[in-house]
Image: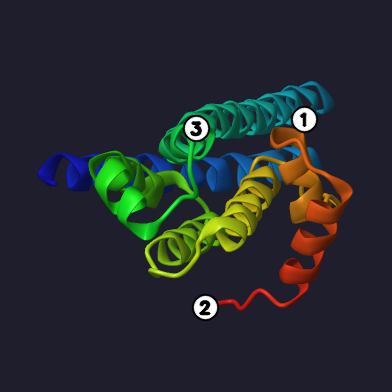
Amino acid sequence: MNHSRSAFAVGLLVAAVSAGALVVAAGGAVWLLVRGPAPASAAVAAGVGFLISKLFESAKENRARLYETKRAVYWDLLGPWLKLLSERERPLTADDIAKEMGPAIVEASFRGILYASDDVLREHIRMRRAGLSGEDVGAELLLRHARMLKAMRKDLGHTFTSLSEVELLEMCVNMKPENRATLEAIRGHLPAR
């Protein structure tokens, strides 16, 4: 915990110094552009442009690293569920989920708390609640799983996705038309919980 606080403090200090240097450089650039000789003005403008491009490049690299980390975390969140849902010989019960997934879900959830978006975390919580509700968990659990997948897709850049939860499920599960119709009907009445 101490390490993360000191890392945060160092990051905050670097950001403050960088922002201060940028303000001073911009102020100096404006002064030279207005009052300075033409070659000095051009050099200052080039320097400011270079600094701004480096800041944008750094931000882009940070987003790319975060994207890759999120993909790995999301795969960890999905892994136990995929294993449990794909290796079934009989209907899934809440006892199966509690017994077979406890440690794997808890470990993945802690990593998810650090990197997952709020929507992904909410859908993961709702999916766990549905799985441990003690009721027949089949259809609702599948739809909750699909909602979590949809939230993950949005967080990873597919912001304007128009795929429904049932369409996402059809990517993973072979479905008869009557099963699809049943899931579509349930999807329309699925509570937020």
Q: Around disc 1, counting alpha carbons within 10 Å, would you say few (fewer than 14), some (14 to 19), or many (20 or more)?
A: some
Q: In the rendered view, would you say 6 is above or below 63?
A: below
Viewer can see residue 57: yes
Which residue carries the number 3 mark?
A: 75
Residue at point 58%, 26% (across, down): 61
Which residue carries the number 1 mark?
A: 41
Q: Report the residue that reaches farthest toward the left.
A: 2
How much space separates mark 3 and mark 1, taking CA atoms? 51 Å
Dot in front, 2 or 3: 2
Viewer can see residue 13: no
| Along the viewing direction, whichever of 67 and 77 lies nearer the viewer | 77
Amino acid beneath label 1? Ser
Q: Report the residue that reaches farthest toward the front.
A: 90
Q: Position of residue 89 (x, y in %)?
A: 49, 36
Q: In the rendered view, would you say 9 is above or below 173?
A: below
Which residue carries the number 2 mark?
A: 193
| Along the viewing direction, whichever of 177 and 119 lies nearer the viewer | 177
Q: Position of residue 88 (x, y in %)?
A: 48, 37
